[in-house]
Amino acid sequence: MQTHVTAIIRNRGQLTIPDPLRQNVSWLEPNSVVSITTLPLGGIVIKPYVHDMDKKATNWTKVWNDIKIARSFRGKKGNLSAFTVNDREEH
């Protein structure tokens, strides 16, 4: 089913995908990574990001949840996130 809606590009190029589209397309959810391609005559195509190696869309909800879990780890000398940031800043 094809849906046609109108939207407004806001400051800094931000585009909010209207509800009718988000309700009809399962991958349009917060924190989804997308691929944006320009077309001749100024058009664009927005598709879910697919890594070339496996040709499957990445489950970004799982990725973000895994990041939250990793950030929550605490040890005797601090947390994993702080350690990683400090390690990268030193090198």
Image (cartoon, grey):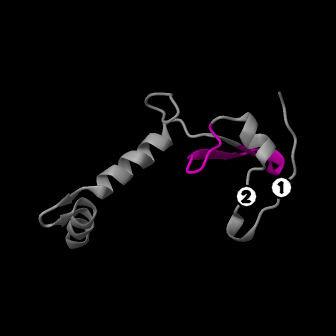
Assess whether mark 2 and mark 1 are in contact (beta carbons under 8 angstroms): yes
The type of residue carrying mark 1 is Ala
The residue to which callout 2 is attached is 15
**Location of residue 16 in the rendering, given as x and y in whole percent from the top left corner:** 73, 56
Q: In the image, 63: left or right of 23? A: left
> Does the magenta-highlighted stretch encompass residue 41?
yes
Q: Quadrant of the C terminus?
A: bottom left
Q: Residues within 10 Å of mark 1 (few under 14, many from 20)?
A: few
> Does the magenta-highlighted stretch encompass residue 11?
no
Point 49% across, 43% down: residue? 61
**Location of residue 47 in the rendering, given as x and y in whole percent from the top left corner:** 65, 39
Image position of 89 with respect to 23: above or below: below
Q: Quadrant of the N terminus?
A: top right
**Location of residue 24 in the rendering, given as x and y in whole percent from the top left corner:** 75, 34
Q: In the image, 44: left or right of 58? A: right
Image position of 7 with respect to 32: above or below: below
The kind of secondary structure element at disc 1 is loop
Sequence-wise, the earlier of marks 1 and 2 is 1
Q: In the image, 89: left or right of 36? A: left
Magenta extent: 27-45
**Location of residue 80 in the rendering, given as x and y in whole percent from the top left corner:** 23, 59
- Determine which quarter of the picture holds residue 2: top right
Point 82% across, 60% down: residue? 8
- Determine which quarter of the picture holds residue 28: top right
Image position of 36 with respect to 89: above or below: above
Point 45% across, 28% down: residue? 54
Q: CA distance from mark 1 to mark 2?
A: 7 Å
Q: Residues within 10 Å of mark 2 (few under 14, many from 20)?
A: few
The residue to which callout 1 is attached is 7
